Amino acid sequence: MVTPCENGQVQPTLLQFCLLDVKVAAAVERCVLSNPRDDVEPAKIDLAPGSRVGMPLDKDSVPPDKLLRLDLAFDGLGPHEIKNGSGLKPGELCTVSIFDPGAEGEKKKFLDLEITFELNGNDRGLRVESFGFLRGREPSGEIKEVREPITRTRIERIQRDFCSPARISQFETNAAECQRKIDKHEESIATINTNIRDRQEQIKSGSDPFGNKQLHEKLKKEIERQIGLANTEKARLKKLEEPLIAEKKKQEELRDLANENAQWCKRMTALFDKLEDKAGIRYLVHVEIERTPVDVVHTTPDTAPEGER
């Protein structure tokens, strides 16, 4: 008989998790003598900060913690992928990446669930933490996607501080004010261009403002001076337009980003509702004795998470 033990000592309660070799002559048949607890319902997902999923792993009735291994499977998540979902040791985590329900034709990460197998003190079970993928504007002005802890409170704060209807409206107003100033400068530049063309026509026709055919050299120089001043003023107005154009672009990007994040918040809230209402975690806790898995606890109705053992 082979049993899970620690320091060479076998606890009587651990005899329910053992292997029995039955030998008849040269033939050997190995039997798994396991009496796992199998009346545990799949765990609900709770995305509140600090949430835990308790597991019936009383120290006095299961093998030593360091021998326990965990397999996980999930229901009701929608399209997702699992990283490190089987054979978890205490302290290790499984990452479940749920894809964006609003992304068409591509698998784009939307929410990560990090599930840690914890056997510390009274916290014997799973710790669930959530991380969202959200686009934001960096101090440098670059817009990039970041991965950050996400909760319902964080979603509400994003809605209030970054993408409320009032804030989106303010971005629209700011962009419109920049455009108004740009248009005003363009009107002035158009007037200057008309004046320059008139002056150039005077020089070309050889007439002065009074229609004289002979243009005095002095008047020609004055007109050329005025053209120079007009070009200088036009360049000044164009220079003033540059920060206005940049600011208008920034306000439009902030408006578009706020609209995008408003939709993101709606989808994330809907996903939170779905996960907490319909999703579940199935698990199997087992030990391995001489490369043979022996079940300790598993959720009903399956003896093991599908595809994880």
Image (spheres, grey):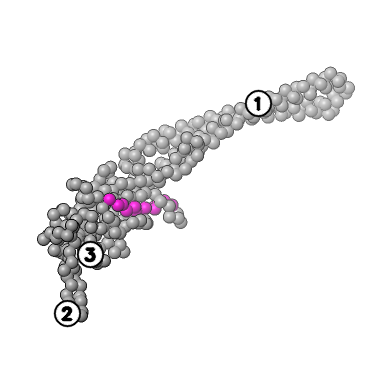
Position of 69 compared to 175: left or right? left
Name which residue type carries label 3: Ile
> Callout 1, which amino acid?
Arg
* Pointer 3 or 1: first along the chain: 1
Asked whether the viewer can see residue 95, the reply is: yes
Question: Foreground mark, 3 or 1?
Answer: 3
- Which residue is drawn at the image coordinates 34% and 52% (left, top)? 95
Q: Name the residue under label 1.
A: 236
Q: Where is residue 283 in the image (x, y as percent from the top left)?
A: 25, 58
Q: Which amino acid does label 2 sit on?
A: Val
Asked whether residue 275 is in view, the answer is no
Q: Is residue 93 magenta?
A: yes
Q: How crowded is mark 3: few (under 14 residues within 10 Å), some or many (20 or more)?
A: some
Segment tinted magenta in the rendering: 91-103
- Coordinates of residue 65 in the picture (x, y in percent): 21, 54
Q: Quadrant of residue 208?
A: top right
Local SS, label 3: strand
Question: Which label's residue is closer to the chain start, 2 or 3?
Answer: 2
Q: In which quarter of the image is residue 260?
A: top left
Q: What residue did someone put label 3 on? A: 289
Residue carrying label 2: 24
Q: How far apart are marks 2 and 3 (CA)?
A: 22 Å
Q: Nearer the viewer, mark 2 or mark 1?
A: 2
Determine if the magenta segment contains residue 168.
no
